[in-house]
Image (cartoon, rainbow, N blue to C red):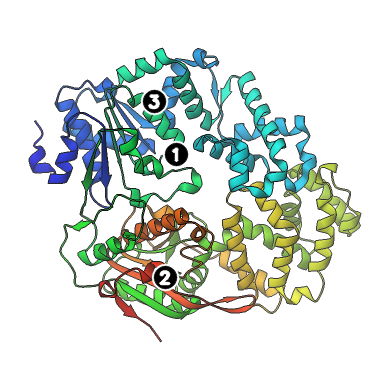
């Protein structure tokens, strides 16, 4: 018999041994959420619940596997019958069993991303959408739009109007494309990744007998990271739980930071209304951070109106080291301060890999990456790509490379493959023609390029002029505004974030006397040697850092317009999510926390004056030490 009294703290024990009924567990950062879920499963088994009556929904198969492995260590028999896995994995099991009821052959195919893109290409050809040129989303962009509409359970027309207004003129064509894509999938007896959930939800809504069967089957439903569920995922769980109402949803509303990929914090905030008579339990004991860090984190999230108010309580003793709020004169001075302090921390015995630099967006880390490279501090980036290695920066650089060197076949190929209907083979033929004629205007492009090719010819002529080759920042601006902005918006749902990166590239380029000097520096920066191990300082966006922790954490670019981002701060819900993002950043630190911002940052127009983030102004002064390096 498991000794729950000994192995769990009081709050964890209340959650683990809670009586039947709908339960929301608000689990603060570092409070042992996974431990509570694991012991809850063990407790149910310990009290005679059959394993086949338990369903555990997580966001990764790895999370489900690790939890069930820990359960097996506590109760080493019978857990194989538990239904555990991601929402899509669980939905697939139901859909596969009852495919005929949903209108599919039981041997239906699941399309991966490349399969979906290929099938969608056939739809583009049938509807002759390639003729729409760059003003219409490419396959990958269209798939992202369709998936987001499915997860939010809103009409495609509504999503386009709210999130992708630059495609508003193409709404009818996109709706027609979505219908044809759906018919093609049905004809092929195939589903894509999003269909696994949406089709299962449709099946359960339409088939009352089937819905009742699964409600009777699962007597206990446990959901991990409930704050990150989309409306579709929450509805899937509700359809299974609405009969017996034996659901335990575990999450932290203060860490809901993924609305841009469909997560809806309202699922968690409205849990008590959706499940009347439910109990709300709290896990507030934090095992990760010092009292000084937690005091600041608690203050950081306090201003949010839409939340379950709670204060994290430290289990650890204090180190008598308050977080530092550091004001630097410029972005370069910020980078210098961070690098210098990292070296000090390393000399004090903190390993490189136990130090992290977190930021709101990739372009915020530009000066930091340059300074770490200059000083020889080893570093790794969670995305695997350093700033200048990102595809959209290399795309724009290809235009400049070709302007400087018309013999650059690699740059030519990279540019022309951005045009509709041009693949590797066609790009090779066009290069041969260009190399032979020596004049871009004389090259005959495929009809699918429309007027975009002539726009490029004009752009190439302009950025190749001696005047602009001495102004690489202006060259990049012209590439973006004449051609690349439209291409990005047609290709990527996160085009706005990529454009922010490119804006920073313009500022960076403004410091070079000519295009050749800029391209040389970009090449050197992207070919810096680095180790394959993760033994360097960790650089990460805050979104990618969720769930991780380090001994020392630097949060940089804490200036209004950057963090919170200007776009997000335009609405109350957007500002509150930005504040949650700040809270997540502060709770990644175990021992040392540095909150850093510059007063000025260079742009192509000179020095931009910055104001400290409004989130810093909300923190009482007694909770941190103010530092202003010279």
Provide the residue designation for mark 1. 230
Provide the residue designation for mark 2. 377
Distance of label 1 from label 2 (alpha carbons): 40 Å
> Label 2 neighbourhood size at 10 Å, few (<14), some (14-19), many (20+)?
some
Mark 2 vs 3, N-terminal side = 3
Q: Indicate left or right for 107 with 307 as reference.
A: right
Mark 1 vs 2, N-terminal side = 1
> Label 1 neighbourhood size at 10 Å, few (<14), some (14-19), many (20+)?
many
Question: In the rendered image, which quarter is residue 314 located in?
Answer: bottom left
Question: In the rendered image, which quarter is residue 168 located in?
Answer: top right
Work out whether residue 555 can be spotted: no
Distance of label 2 from label 3 (alpha carbons): 52 Å
- Looking at the rendered image, the disc whose residue lies closer to the viewer, 2 or 3, is 3
Distance of label 1 from label 3 (alpha carbons): 14 Å
Provide the residue designation for mark 3. 239
Query: Which SS class for mark 3?
Result: helix
Q: Residue 498, position in %: x, y?
A: 59, 57
* As drawn, 583 above or below 54: below
Task: Name the quadrant of the N terminus.
Answer: top left
Query: Which SS class for mark 1?
Result: loop
């Amino acid at each position: 018999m498991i000794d729950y009294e000994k192995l769990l703290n009081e709050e964890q024990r209340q959650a683990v041994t809670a009586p039947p009924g709908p339960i929301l567990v608000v689990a603060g950062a570092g409070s042992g959420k996974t431990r509570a879920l694991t012991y809850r499963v063990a407790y149910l088994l310990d009290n005679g619940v059959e394993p086949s009556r338990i369903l555990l929904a997580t966001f990764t198969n790895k999370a489900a596997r690790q939890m069930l492995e820990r359960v097996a260590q506590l109760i080493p028999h019978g857990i194989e019958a538990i239904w555990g896995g991601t929402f899509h994995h669980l939905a697939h099991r139901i859909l596969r069993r009852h495919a005929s009821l949903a209108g599919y052959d039981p041997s239906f195919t699941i399309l991966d991303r490349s399969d979906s893109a290929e099938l969608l290409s056939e739809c583009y050809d049938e509807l002759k959408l390639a003729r729409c040129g760059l003003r219409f989303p490419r396959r990958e962009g269209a798939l992202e739009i369709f998936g987001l509409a499915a997860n939010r359970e809103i009409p495609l027309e509504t999503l386009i109007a709210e999130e992708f207004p630059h495609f508003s003129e193409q709404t009818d064509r996109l709706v027609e494309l979505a219908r044809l894509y759906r018919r093609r999938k049905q004809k092929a007896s195939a589903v894509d990744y999003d269909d696994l959930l949406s089709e299962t939800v449709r099946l359960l809504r339409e088939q009352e007998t089937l819905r009742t069967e699964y409600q009777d089957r699962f007597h206990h439903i446990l959901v991990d990271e409930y704050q990150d569920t989309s409306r579709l995922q929450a509805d899937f769980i509700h359809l299974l739980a609405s009969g017996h109402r034996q659901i335990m949803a575990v999450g932290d509303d203060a860490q809901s930071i993924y609305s841009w990929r469909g997560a809806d914090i309202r699922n968690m905030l409205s849990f008590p209304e959706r499940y009347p008579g439910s109990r709300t339990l709290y896990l507030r004991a934090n095992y990760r951070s010092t009292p000084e860090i937690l005091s600041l984190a608690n203050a950081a999230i306090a201003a949010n109106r839409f939340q379950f108010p709670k204060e994290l309580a430290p289990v650890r003793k204090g180190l008598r080291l308050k977080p530092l709020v550091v004001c630097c004169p410029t972005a370069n001075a910020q980078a210098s301060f961070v690098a210098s302090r990292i070296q000090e921390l390393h000399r004090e015995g903190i390993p490189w890999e136990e130090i992290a630099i977190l930021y709101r967006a990739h372009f915020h880390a530009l000066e930091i990456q340059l300074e770490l490279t200059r000083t020889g501090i080893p570093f790794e980036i969670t995305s695997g790509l350093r700033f200048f290695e990102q595809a959209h920066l290399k795309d724009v650089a290809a235009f400049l490379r070709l302007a400087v060197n018309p013999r650059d076949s690699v740059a030519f190929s990279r540019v022309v493959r951005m045009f509709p209907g041009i693949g590797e083979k066609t790009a090779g033929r066009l290069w041969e023609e260009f190399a032979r004629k020596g004049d871009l205007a004389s090259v005959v492009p495929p009809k699918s390029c429309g007027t975009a090719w002539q726009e490029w010819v004009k752009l190439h002529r302009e950025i190749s002029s001696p005047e602009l080759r001495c102004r690489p920042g202006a060259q990049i601006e012209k590439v973006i505004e004449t051609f690349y902005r439209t291409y990005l918006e047609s290709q990527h749902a996160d085009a706005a974030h990529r454009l922010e990166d490119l804006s920073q590239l313009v500022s960076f380029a403004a410091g070079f006397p000519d295009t050749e000097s800029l391209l040389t520096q970009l090449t050197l920066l992207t070919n810096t040697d680095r180790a394959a191990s993760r033994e360097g300082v960790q650089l990460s966006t805050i979104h990618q850092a969720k769930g991780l922790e380090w001994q020392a954490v630097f949060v940089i670019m804490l200036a209004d317009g950057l963090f919170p981002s200007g776009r997000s701060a335009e609405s109350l819900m957007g500002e509150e999510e930005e504040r949650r993002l700040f809270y997540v950043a502060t709770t990644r630190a175990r021992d040392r926390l540095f909150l850093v911002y510059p007063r000025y940052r260079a742009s192509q127009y000179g020095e931009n004056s910055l104001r400290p983030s409004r989130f810093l102004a909300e923190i009482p002064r007694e909770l941190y030490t103010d530092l202003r390096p010279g």
